[in-house]
Amino acid sequence: MWKEHDNKLQRTFLFSDFVMAFGFMTKVALVAEKMNHHPKWTNAWNKVEITLSTHDAGDVITEKDRALADAIDKIYVDE
């Protein structure tokens, strides 16, 4: 579930191992590139933490962030 914190959307995704986490990140990267909206994220073994905000709107949550969050959720369900 995405949480709003400090005008940003944040969510942690857990996987069975590093390969699954990295595969998820690769799929998200392709979608983010098509949307021209790139997340801030970290990865440690099986955990991916994603933060979304729109920098050119003052680093706050916009519809771009909500659309990317929805797309990310769909990718995660398919994993």
Image (cartoon, helix red, strand yellow):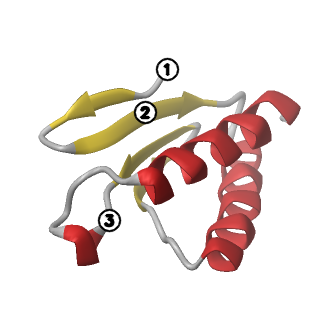
Asked whether, in this view, residue 29 is left or right of residue 60, the answer is right
Question: Which residue is drawn at the image coordinates 64% and 78% (left, top)?
Answer: 33
Q: Is residue 7 above or below residue 14?
A: below
* Disc assigned to residue 11: 2
CA gap between label 1 and label 2 equals 6 Å
Q: Secondary structure at mark 3?
A: loop
Question: Which residue is drawn at the image coordinates 43% and 33% (left, top)?
Answer: 11
Residue type at mark 3: give it: Thr
Residue type at mark 1: give it: Met
Question: Which residue is drawn at the image coordinates 45% and 62% (left, top)?
Answer: 39
CA gap between label 1 and label 3 equals 19 Å
Q: Is there CB contact under 8 Å for labels 1 and 2?
A: yes
| Relative image position of residue 63 (x, y in whole percent) | 46, 52
Residue type at mark 2: give it: Arg
| Relative image position of residue 70 (x, y in whole percent) | 63, 40
| Relative image position of residue 73 (x, y in whole percent) | 67, 35
| Residue that numbered label 3 is attached to | 54
Q: Nearer the viewer, residue 70 or 27?
A: 70
Q: Residues within 10 Å of mark 2 (few under 14, many from 20)?
A: some
Question: Which residue is drawn at the image coordinates 18% and 44% (left, top)?
Answer: 7
Mark 2 or 3, which is nearer the eye? 3
Asked whether, in this view, residue 60 is left or right of residue 1, the answer is left
The numbered mark, 1 or 2, whose residue comes first in the sequence reads 1
Res. 60 image quadrant:
bottom left
| Relative image position of residue 12 (x, y in whole percent) | 45, 32
| Residue that numbered label 1 is attached to | 1
The numbered mark, 1 or 3, whose residue comes first in the sequence reads 1
